[in-house]
Amino acid sequence: MSEHVIVVHGDLLIKERLDIACESCCIEDTPKNHLQFIVFLPGLFHYKMACTDTLWRIHVQPKHGRDDEVGMFKHICILRPSELNTIGSKPGFQQMHDVIHHDLWAAMLDCWHMEVSTHHSQWTSLDKFAESDPKWDDIVEISMVIISKAPSDQRDQAFENQILWNQDELLYVDLCDAMNASDVGRVEASFLPWIYIFKAVGKHKYAVQVSHFCAHLHYGYPEGLQKIIYLNMLCNPTGKAHAFLIYSGTGPNHTIDHIINESPLIEVYQNYHITIENAFHLSQCTIRHAPPNMTKTIQKLIHRMVASSPHQFAVGRTTKHVIDDKLADGVMLLQKGAGLLPGNEDDEAAQIEADDLWEN
């Protein structure tokens, strides 16, 4: 065992228990008895849950900002009108995950609608822009213009709030896309900005553990072990493109060995489904529901954005709640010597439902 390692995926609680076990074995004589063969990897599913909870704390939780006409909560009123109480108090992971994605789609369409009209007089709408069969160079050029607009010395609090919300949403959606594609390099690149945000929001434990993992990965582990970690951060049981999953769950039964032992039962269960479907002449059956058609809802949200103009700079516009740039705040905290030390925080796990275990 001294020449081998066991890779353990888990959340903060599992990490803390492993640290306690290793500390209690520090007086032993051999590396095996020291439990040095255990290599901990932060569970990326729990990492995503921490990210959604962080965005909720920044943009949704402040109650004095929910009455702003260009605030995030007004967008949620359109996207999830029947779930306002849950999202306002203690949302589930899938709720925030969907809200972030759908709101970002509407925000990006609004940005593009504003920008393409300034590039060509015939591009009066995004439909006209798409019908013109734009070249890839045009798309890249417009994208660069959108992200490179210089900030003004004057203030527009509504515009600033929306830009910060777009920034945080893009960080999260890029992380989700990188995980689904198993782009481990992009996943690793996301760690640093989220460490800063975790620190600023008060999720000190996540900031500490993710930073320790990065330090061990780059400066503590040999090259061969680094490769093993990169190859085992995500898995793709279906073999389909963009369908990588994350080992998740809690308890002693959520291990790779247990999953392998239960695999034959999955095939038996599937055969039962096929037998029933054939007996009752059922067709086009599936255990997964189709994703909801959000086209009309997103169009409604876009119409609201056009009316409220959150992406159009208006000098002197004010809001009831001003959102702080938590990414910049986290950088300043670390530069001032706040350090990455665990502190008192409310890191209660969000409620996990069955649908949360399916990647979107």
Image (cartoon, helix red, strand yellow):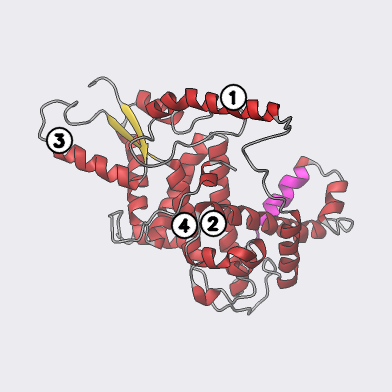
Do the residues under discs 3 and 4 have CB atoms within 8 angstroms?
Answer: no
Q: Is residue 336 above or below residue 317?
A: above
Q: Is residue 78 magenta?
A: no
What percent of the width, then of the height, locates residue 138? Answer: 77, 46
What's the magenta region? 137-152
Residue 209 visible, this orientation: yes
Task: Kindly identify which residue carries mark 2.
Answer: 168
Which residue was labeled with disc 1?
271
Q: Which residue is mark 3?
A: 25
Residue at 30% x, 60% y is 338
* Label 2 environment density (alpha carbons within 10 Å; few <14, some 14–19, many ≥20): many
Marker disc for residue 53 = 4
Mark 1 in CB contact with mark 3 (< 8 angstroms):
no
Q: Measuring from the top left, give residue 228's x and y in whole percent.
A: 40, 26
| Callout 2 touching callout 3 (CB < 8 Å) | no
How far is the residue under mark 1 from the one under mark 2? Answer: 44 Å
Mark 2–mark 4 Cα distance, whole angstroms, equals: 12 Å
In x, y percent, where is residue 198? Answer: 41, 56
Q: Nearer the viewer, residue 71 or 155?
A: 71
Q: Amino acid at mark 3?
A: Cys
Chain-order first, disc 1 or disc 3 = 3
The Cα–Cα distance between marks 4 and 1, rounded to whole angstroms, is 39 Å
51, above or below 6, in the image:
below
Mark pair 1, 3: CA separation: 47 Å
Report if residue 149 lies within the magenta region: yes
Q: Tag 4, which secondary structure?
A: helix
Disc 2 from disc 3: Cα separation: 41 Å
Dot 1 falls on a residue whose secondary structure is: helix
Quarter of the image where one finds residue 279: top right
Q: Amino acid at mark 2?
A: Asp
